[in-house]
Image: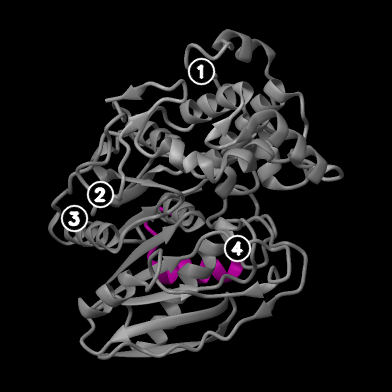
Amino acid sequence: MSLKGFGLAGIVAIVAVAASGRPAALGKPGLTPAPCPDQKWEESDATFEALPGAKASFGRYDGGVYRVEVPDKWNGELVLWAHGYVANAGAQGSRLRVGFPGTGQGSPLRSHLITNGFAWAASSYRCNGYVPGRGLLDSIALTDLVAKQTGKAPARVYLTGASMGGHITILGLQEFPTAFAGGLAMCPAGPGEMDFLTSVREVSELITGVKVTSATRDTDVARLTEILGKPPEYTPKGRQLASVQILLSGGPRPFALEGLESRFTDNASTMSGTGDTIWDRVATNSDVRYSIEGGLNLTADAINTGVKRKPADPEARSERGPYEEAVPFDGKLERPLLTIHNTGDLYVPVSLEQSLKRSVDSAGKSRLLVQRLMRSAGHCTFSPEEQIAAFDDLAKWVRQDVRPEGDDVLGDLTNAGLKFTQPLRPGDPGTRGIAGSAKP
């Protein structure tokens, strides 16, 4: 339910109304976030030291803990940084933490923003877990906080984030389409990630005969490893599952096999949920058409005939479902969106970028989307140069209406990413197939 025409001041007021997480009446303005996990939360120390030529503020607000940094020579523009998924289980699962803009070591995007006159703000959110709706509302509320601290409302607000924070960025541009000047979504996740993991889990069970459950997880994972092998030493069945994962995740491309090494068993052992969370309810592989390379003693027809299909809860995945964050993106952009993605990401795969492109094209908004691919393995493994170039090009796009270049994510990806990867990673392998043949 988009809020066309609402300014940020109006949205901040709506955030307060939606903060309880209780479903609002359908059709009313606002975003209804999925509820936070029901547990107690401990706030971390948000204290940090400002960079030279800037002032820092930090502390607690209704959205958890926050950090704000404003340069002395502020250009009046604000960057909201949305962090990625933080597990709500384990020893540190109840601890709310707030970071700095950008991914990787040293927060290079942070220093670049301050040097170039941008203020930034980041939140822990009020809870951990996969909570993009909650994260969006808590991030939006920072705008009002910055305005009160500086004595003036930001002239422009950019929404940025990585992984779940990338989902938050796209969700923000969907639900509040004219509120932000533009968005930079790094390795953005979304409901499509749940579909991907569900699709891998079901084909893994078909190939191995092993169903992973919470009660027998350790034993099940050991059995999977015995049957499939460990990358790159796959068994014949392991080669089958590896091939299917590569093709499900976007097709042959540089660093896909290298990226699979850290995710192969984890993807295969994703457990079927109990159905009591929104993400269990919306995940599906009902319409997935599985593929596999030749020469692996398994055909696509055999997979598609034999694989178990998990339907989505039609009410939860509907546009009139209770939580907008769980519904696939509708593509109806009103402001520029630039995304960057690693070719070798096998956790939040390139296939999500392909789905995003199709949605935006179908909505007739192609001119407002630019997508870039970086040749590297792993999730959100961007260099400082790649992140800075993406933000600078987004800002130029917003300020001067100069649309930057991008990659065709729906085209041939076998040699993708050469245009924007800075620098090429050591030992860049090109593209290799699981069946053993090198691909150009």
User: Could you tell me which residue is drawn at 59 percent across and 78 percent down?
Assistant: 62
Whether 10 is among the magenta residues is yes
Q: CA distance from mark 4 to mark 1?
A: 33 Å
Residue 98: image x %, image y %? 52, 75
Q: Which is closer to the viewer, label 2 or label 3? A: 2
Q: Where is mark 2, residue-wise?
A: 424
Q: Is residue 142 left or right of residue 397?
A: right
Q: Earlier in the sequence, mark 4 or mark 3?
A: 4
Q: CA distance from mark 2 to mark 4?
A: 30 Å
Disc number for residue 397: 3
Q: Is residue 167 left or right of residue 108?
A: right
Say what amino acid the circle numbered 2 marks.
Leu
Toward the viewer: 291 or 371? Answer: 291
Toward the viewer: 207 or 304? Answer: 207
User: Could you tell me which residue is drawn at 60 percent across and 21 percent down?
Assistant: 236
Say what amino acid the circle numbered 3 marks.
Trp
Q: Where is mark 1, residue-wise?
A: 291
Q: Earlier in the sequence, mark 1 or mark 3?
A: 1
Does the CB distance between marks 2 and 3 fall below 8 Å?
Answer: no
Magenta region: 3-18
Q: Earlier in the sequence, mark 2 or mark 3?
A: 3
User: Could you tell me which residue is drawn at 27 percent across and 41 percent down?
Assistant: 417
Q: Residues within 10 Å of mark 3 (few under 14, many from 20)?
A: some
Q: Where is mark 4, residue-wise?
A: 86
Does the CB distance between marks 2 and 4 fall below 8 Å?
Answer: no
Residue 400: image x %, image y %? 12, 58
Say what amino acid the circle numbered 4 marks.
Val
Q: Which is closer to the viewer, label 2 or label 1? A: 2
User: Could you tell me which residue is drawn at 33 percent across and 49 percent down?
Assistant: 340
